[in-house]
Image (spheres, grey):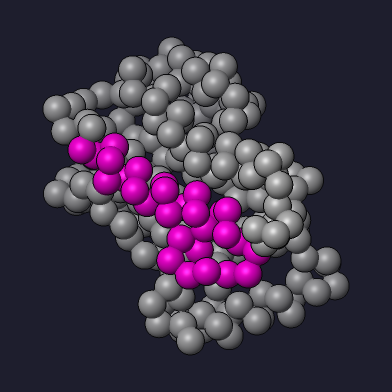
């Protein structure tokens, strides 16, 4: 049970009016905000990945709206409702560092998100609000179900586990623990930093 100190808000992070409503309702329930995690991103429903030869403007816009624009405006709309000294945590991807086939747009968006952590921290120095980014590797989330047929799921996960230097794919808890650290005072000296929580995939995988 999540208890009384929890609310769920149904919203689309690609819509400005929804983002504004999220933070107004949150402040109304809990007061000023100390931590924002901009975690939305990944695959757009009904949109497939592809190469620069295949992807046109519509897919470009939808991919960037979800993976980049929503991050910027999540922070933009959160700021009036945040305490000074708060923590912003962004979610990148190792696709920002490694060029995977058909992931050009996604990787470019995540590379920009990594820059946002630096830029936001610089923008917000006067308020002592720090922004940092977590860069996951392959993580066991429902996104697999969007792209992989059920009868191939186990084989695909095994493939990625074999690629990962650590010998397994990540779990949401691996990312969550890093987020808890960045949200805490233990990370108070970190601004604009990137934490690779990727099982070695970015720099150690062959």
Residue 79, given in percent of the width and then of the height, sits at: 34, 23
In the rendered structure, the answer to whether residue 155 lies left or right of residue 174 reads right
In the rendered structure, the answer to whether residue 200 lies left or right of residue 138 reads left
Q: Quadrant of residue 194?
A: bottom left
Residue 56, given in percent of the width and then of the height, sits at: 71, 47
Q: Quadrant of residue 154?
A: bottom right
Residue 163, visible in the rendered structure: yes
Identified at 58% across, 69% down, the residue is 100
Residue lying at the far front of the rendered structure: 53
Question: Magenta region: which residues?
Answer: 95-122
- Image: 137 above or below 57: below
Residue 91, given in percent of the width and then of the height, sits at: 44, 50
Q: Is residue 126 located in the magenta-colored stretch of the structure?
A: no
Identified at 42% across, 22% down, the residue is 77
Image quadrant where one finds the N terminus: top right
In the rendered structure, the answer to whether residue 130 lies left or right of residue 113 reads left
Q: Depth check: 53 or 82 in front?
A: 53
- Magenta: main secondary structure equals helix
Residue 57, given in percent of the width and then of the height, sits at: 68, 41
Q: Depth check: 47 or 91 in front?
A: 47
Residue 137, visible in the rendered structure: no
Q: Is residue 116 located in the magenta-colored stretch of the structure?
A: yes
- Image: 16 above or below 178: above
Q: Depth check: 169 or 200 in front?
A: 200
Identified at 83% across, 67% down, the residue is 150
Query: Total of numbered circles in the picture?
Result: 0
Identified at 59% across, 30% down, the residue is 14
């Amino acid at each position: 049970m999540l208890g009384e100190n929890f609310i769920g808000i149904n919203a689309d992070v690609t819509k400005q009016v929804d983002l504004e409503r999220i933070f107004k309702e949150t402040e109304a329930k809990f007061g000023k905000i100390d931590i924002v995690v901009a975690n939305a991103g990944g695959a757009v429903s009904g949109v497939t990945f592809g190469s620069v030869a295949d992807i046109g403007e519509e897919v470009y816009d939808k991919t960037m709206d979800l993976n980049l624009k929503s991050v910027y405006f999540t922070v933009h709309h959160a700021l009036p409702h945040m305490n000074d000294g708060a923590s912003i945590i962004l979610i990148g991807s190792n696709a920002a560092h490694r060029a995977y086939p058909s992931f050009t747009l996604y990787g470019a968006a995540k590379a920009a998100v990594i820059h946002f952590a630096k830029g936001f921290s610089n923008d917000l120095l006067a308020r002592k609000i720090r922004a940092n980014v977590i860069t996951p590797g392959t993580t066991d989330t429902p996104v697999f179900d969007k792209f992989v047929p059920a009868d191939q799921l186990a084989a695909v996960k095994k493939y990625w586990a074999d690629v990962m230097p650590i010998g397994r794919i990540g779990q949401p808890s691996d990312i969550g623990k890093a987020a808890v650290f960045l949200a805490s005072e233990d990370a108070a000296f970190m601004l604009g930093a990137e934490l690779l929580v990727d099982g070695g995939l970015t720099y150690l995988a062959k």
